[in-house]
Image: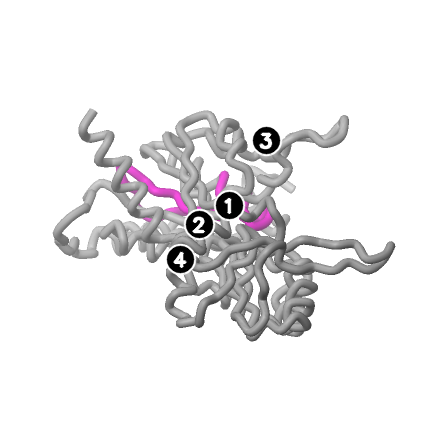
């Protein structure tokens, strides 16, 4: 295949799309708002972060740049953006390899702008160190790739904060623990017990619980035999109480599903599951509901049908604070 001719033909085919987008953006009337607004800033996003990016743009009182996505016949990804601005806020969760490549391409397309990258969910972040000889430090490799052409990065509840040091520019992490707590408050549960799945997640659970001044504990595993394990709250009793198991990520949901059954056996009234990142692999949502979880609550860092909490406002607040500090310098 003559790739050059193939590529030129593809560009020619998509040229009219860019022209339409440019005309569309130029024809849009700017709406004046009180408070924060930057007429030279726009938001742009990958396919997997469209809802969050739209909400973020509204919170920043700016517009979203439309992007057309397609593939070449050999499977390679292609994209073309509308009219960019001096400052771009690029939003893209790395939920799979296609999303990663798309984000890399989008960053490159914005090379003439001052770019701020929002990584709501960063895949590969859990491989933050070399556990065995011959392994890559995947989080470092991805961070270095995504740093090119970016002036600042914001992550949301990144699995390990140590990963931030791998980026080649200022990077900060924000937490949605308080937002999860606020949502739990809206459920009007009577004296809920906020439960971490293990001691490592206890700090996150404490931040969630602080929103309502609720009791907080973590699950403790007791091995009864070579194959049987019992899970109970370490200190507090779940009897006749609503229990909310909280964590930064729900992946397979296996531990939470097992804990749910045991909590009901111990007399829990209801069991909920809440997290920031609803990875929900391998039928995890159905598995959790089948295990008796009354509701699964997650944010839109990974856009799901159960995304009941948005990271948009917290991200917008962080961007505004950063902009305010930069203007004072």
- Residue beneath label 1, please? 203
The residue lying toward the viewer, choosing from 208 and 77, is 208
Q: Position of residue 159 (x, y in %)?
A: 55, 42
Q: Are marks 3 and 2 in contact (CB under 8 Å)?
A: no
Q: Are marks 2 and 1 in contact (CB under 8 Å)?
A: yes
Q: Quadrant of residue 189?
A: bottom left
Distance of label 1 from label 4 (alpha carbons):
14 Å
Identify the mark nearer the N-term, 4 or 3.
3
- Residue beneath label 3, please? 141
Q: Position of residue 17 (x, y in %)?
A: 38, 54
Residue 328 seen anywhere in this rendered image of the structure: yes
- Residue beneath label 2, please? 207
Per the rendered image, the range of residues in magenta is: 78-104
Q: Left or right: 184 with respect to 42?
A: right
Q: Which mark is residue 213?
A: 4
Residue shown at 52% from the left, 28% from the top: 166
Q: Quadrant of residue 113?
A: top left
């Amino acid at each position: 295949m003559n790739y050059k001719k193939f590529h030129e033909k593809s560009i020619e085919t998509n040229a009219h799309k860019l022209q339409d987008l440019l005309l569309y953006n130029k024809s849009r009337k700017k709406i004046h708002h009180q408070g924060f607004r930057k007429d030279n800033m726009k938001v742009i996003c990958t396919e997997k972060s469209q809802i969050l990016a739209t909400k973020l743009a509204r919170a920043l009182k700016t517009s979203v740049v439309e992007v057309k996505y397609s593939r070449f016949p050999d499977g390679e990804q292609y994209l073309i953006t509308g009219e960019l601005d001096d400052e771009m806020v690029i939003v893209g969760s790395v939920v799979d390899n296609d999303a990663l490549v798309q984000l890399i391409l989008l960053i490159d397309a914005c090379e003439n702008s001052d770019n701020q990258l929002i990584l709501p969910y960063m895949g590969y972040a859990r491989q933050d160190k070399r556990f065995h000889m011959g392994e890559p430090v995947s989080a470092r490799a991805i961070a270095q790739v995504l740093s090119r052409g970016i002036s600042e990065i914001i992550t949301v509840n990144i699995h390990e904060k140590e990963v931030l040091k791998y980026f080649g520019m200022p990077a900060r992490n924000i937490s949605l623990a308080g937002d999860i707590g606020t949502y739990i408050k809206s459920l009007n549960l009577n004296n809920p017990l906020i439960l971490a799945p293990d001691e490592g997640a206890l700090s996150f659970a404490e931040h969630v619980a602080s929103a309502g001044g609720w009791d907080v504990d973590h699950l403790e595993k007791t091995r009864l035999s070579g194959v049987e394990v019992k899970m109970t709250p370490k200190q507090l009793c779940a009897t006749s109480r609503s229990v909310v198991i909280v964590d930064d990520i729900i992946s397979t949901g296996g531990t939470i599903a097992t804990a749910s059954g045991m909590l009901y056996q111990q007399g829990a009234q209801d069991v909920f599951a809440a997290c920031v990142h609803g990875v929900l692999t391998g039928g995890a949502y159905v598995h959790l509901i089948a295990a008796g979880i009354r509701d699964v609550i997650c944010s839109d860092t990974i856009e799901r049908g159960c995304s009941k909490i948005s990271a948009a406002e917290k991200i917008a607040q962080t961007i505004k604070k950063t902009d305010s500090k930069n203007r004072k310098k």
